[in-house]
Image: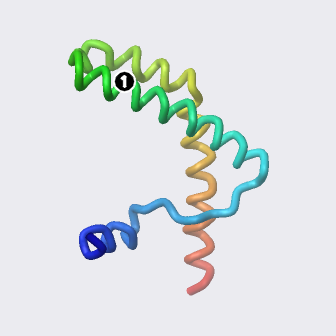
Amino acid sequence: MHETYLQDMNSKYVYPNVFMSIDDTNKVSQYDTDIKKYAEQKKADGILHGGIEKEWDSYLKKMEQYGLSNYLSIKQKYFDQYQESLSEEK
């Protein structure tokens, strides 16, 4: 199992460990809780009942109500800072 996952764990596509402000950490934590709970619920509904295509627009609207854009903006800000710090090390 170690060999199976190791390559992906070191992939450039894995979100790095970053330091966030306390405010952003709290926001990300709340968004993460709400977004993941809803996503898991809808995934289960889709598997059991189908209809994903029909409900896609309402799903995206609800995700936005849970703060998806704000969540992604915060995560992107720290990812960009991380990438910048890597380029400064060279």
Q: Is residue 80 left or right of residue 13?
A: right
Residue hosting label 1: 42
The crowd level at tag 1 (other Cα within 10 Å; few <14, some 14-19, many 20+) is some
Q: Is residue 31 left or right of residue 12?
A: right
How far across and how far down the image is residue 82, in percent?
A: 59, 67
Query: Looking at the image, which residue is at 62% across and 57% down?
Result: 78
- Against 75, residue 3 (above or below) is below
Coloration mode: rainbow
Query: Looking at the image, which residue is at 72% across and 43% down?
Result: 26
Q: Toward which corner of the image does residue 31 lie, by quadrant?
A: top right
Identify which residue, 47 or 78, lies in the foreground. 47
The residue type indicated by label 1 comes to: Lys
Q: Is residue 2 left or right of residue 33?
A: left
How far across and how far down the image is residue 23, in percent?
A: 78, 45
Residue at the far bottom: name it.
Answer: 90
Identify which residue, 69 or 49, lies in the foreground. 49
Q: Check disc 1 and report its element: helix, strand or loop.
A: helix
Residue at the far right: name it.
Answer: 22
Total number of numbered discs in the rendering: 1
Query: Looking at the image, which residue is at 58% across and 65% down?
Result: 17
Identify which residue, 64 or 49, lies in the foreground. 49
Query: Looking at the image, which residue is at 65% across and 36% down?
Result: 30
Q: Toward which corner of the image does residue 9 lie, by quadrant?
A: bottom left
The quadrant in which the N terminus is found is bottom left
Q: Is residue 50 left or right of residue 17?
A: left
- Against 51, residue 14 (above or below) is below
How far across and how far down the image is residue 37, in percent?
A: 49, 31
The quadrant in which the C terminus is found is bottom right
